[in-house]
């Protein structure tokens, strides 16, 4: 669907203009301030709703203005009226070939008009990621929204997992286990039992020694008494018999004590408890290190699991990226050499924003045409960026793809160009004399 005829009256700088386009490239040219931009704005205002209409759409000195577009299948008319306060009112009608009017004309037009119809260079001005999103509309066989949703879900999950990984790594690194720490705890109860037995044995040895010392002391006492008795013999001759008797009794006691000592046998040796005491002292440190070792082993296992989970999520994202890339490669994009990457758009392997102005305009027009399958009309206000070769290429592209491209240029010398002078379409001879 193309514009078959444009009629505009009292719109911006236009007085009365009627244009019946001939061919796919409609070049509107003329000096600045003559009304050529008003022609393209008239098309814009007729189709795009009230939002883009400027504050003063009606020509100075006029009370009303109108734009009528004959689209073949539909006739679109937008009228303007200036109020007493200087503001304006506007109305829109869309009728079919039989003259029947539609109850919601703007809704009908919105279904016909693509997002880039009125300014294809909006595409070149987009951020790289926004360009990628716009071009995804041209890849119908792949659900980018669902893929983005799943990738965002995996990305967020991976972020959480990686946060856990960093936390686990920090916790693992914070646990310092000395070299040589055993895997199992020291049996402190067994060591205490061993110490208790050693202490009991030492206590028995001590009691044995006390008994021996007691008997030894008794022997010493008796021997001292014998010595005193023998010393008294000289002085106590009268008592010799009695003393000897006492001596004999004490000697008998000595023998009895010696027999008792013999019965006791040799005293057991003292056991050195330093080793077990040292092991008991070290057991607390060892057991603490064993617990640290077990804790570190557990954290390392969790770390391995989280790392594997993160790798799996990364793999899922990569698979979807690969599927999206394949869908783009398989899609019939409107310009040869146009590629979509995750981060932006490439043209012949070069970032799109590094292409020349003419290349960007050419691609933007092609993208706009691909996004506008019903109303094949595109408005280009920056046609002066195109040289003769680029303009010829644009005309060929428009014809090959069934587009009607309205291009604004300055002082074109091309014969087919429509020259606007002082709000009117200039006659060919007039246009030629001023060119």
Image (cartoon, rainbow, N blue to C red):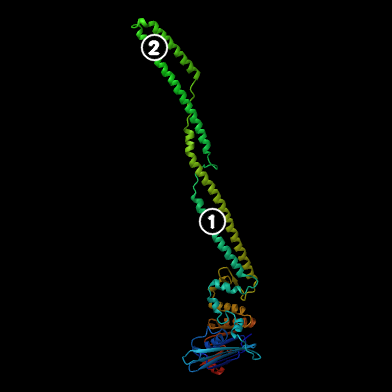
Look at discs 2 and 1 and give the one toward the viewer. Answer: 2
Residue 44: image x %, image y %? 55, 85
Residue 325 is situated, as x and y percent measured from the top left of the image, at 62, 68
Judge left or right: residue 64 versus residue 70: left
Secondary-structure class at tag 1: helix
Question: Which residue matches tag 2?
Answer: 226
Q: Residues within 10 Å of mark 1 (few under 14, many from 20)?
A: many
Q: Residue at x 51, y 36 (%)?
A: 191
* Residue at position x 58%, y 63% in the image: 154
Q: Nearer the viewer, residue 299 or 73?
A: 299
Picture coordinates of residue 349 (x, y %)?
58, 70
**Residue 276: horizontal and vertical position, in percent?**
49, 34
Residue 425, image quadrant: bottom right
Secondary element at image label 2? helix
The quarter of the displayed image where residue 152 is located: bottom right
Report crowding for label 2: few under 14, some 14 to 19, many 20 or more residues within 10 A (C-alpha). some
Q: CA distance from mark 2 to mark 1?
A: 91 Å
Which of marks 1 and 2 precedes in the sequence?
A: 1
If the image is split into quadrants, where does the N terminus sit? bottom right
Q: What residue did someone put label 1 on? A: 165
Examine the rendering and report whether any part of residue 276 can be seen. Answer: yes
């Amino acid at each position: 669907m193309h514009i078959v005829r444009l009629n505009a009256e009292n719109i911006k700088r236009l007085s009365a203009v009627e244009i019946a386009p001939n061919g796919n490239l409609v070049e509107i040219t003329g000096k600045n301030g003559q009304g050529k931009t008003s022609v393209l704005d008239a098309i814009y205002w007729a189709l795009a709703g009230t939002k883009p209409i400027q504050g003063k759409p009606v020509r100075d000195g006029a009370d009303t203005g109108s734009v009528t577009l004959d689209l073949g299948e539909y006739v679109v008319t937008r009228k303007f009226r200036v109020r007493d306060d200087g503001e304006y009112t506007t109305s829109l009608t869309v009728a079919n070939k039989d003259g029947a009017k539609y109850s919601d004309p703007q809704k009908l037009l919105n279904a016909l008009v693509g997002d880039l119809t009125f300014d294809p260079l909006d595409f070149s001005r987009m951020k790289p990621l926004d360009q990628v999103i716009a071009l995804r509309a041209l890849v119908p066989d792949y659900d980018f929204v669902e893929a983005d949703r799943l990738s965002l879900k995996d990305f967020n999950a991976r972020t959480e997992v990686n946060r856990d990984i960093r936390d686990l790594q920090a916790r693992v690194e914070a646990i310092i286990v000395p070299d040589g720490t055993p895997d199992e705890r020291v049996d402190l109860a067994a060591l205490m039992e061993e110490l208790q037995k050693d202490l009991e044995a030492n206590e028995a040895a001590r009691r044995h020694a006390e008994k021996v010392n007691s008997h030894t002391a008794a022997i010493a006492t008796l021997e001292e008494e014998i010595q005193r008795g023998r010393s008294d013999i000289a002085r106590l001759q009268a008592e010799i018999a009695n003393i000897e008797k006492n001596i004999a009794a004490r000697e008998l006691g000595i023998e009895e004590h010696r027999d008792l000592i013999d019965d006791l046998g040799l005293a057991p040796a003292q056991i050195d408890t330093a080793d077990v005491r040292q092991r008991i002292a070290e057991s607390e440190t060892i057991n603490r290190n064993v617990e640290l070792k077990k804790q570190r082993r557990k954290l390392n296992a969790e770390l391995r699991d989280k790392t594997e989970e993160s790798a799996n999520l990364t793999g899922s994202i990569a698979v979807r990226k690969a599927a999206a890339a394949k869908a783009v490669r398989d899609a019939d994009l409107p310009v040869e050499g146009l590629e979509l990457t995750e981060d932006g758009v490439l043209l012949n392997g070069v970032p799109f924003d590094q292409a020349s102005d003419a290349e960007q305009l050419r691609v933007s027009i092609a993208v706009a045409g691909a996004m506008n399958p019903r109303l094949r009309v595109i408005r280009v206000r920056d046609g002066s960026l195109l040289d003769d070769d680029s303009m010829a290429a644009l005309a060929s592209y428009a014809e090959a793809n069934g587009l009607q491209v309205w291009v604004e240029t300055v002082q074109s010398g091309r014969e087919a160009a429509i020259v606007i002078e002082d709000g009117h379409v200039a006659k060919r001879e007039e246009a030629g004399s001023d060119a």
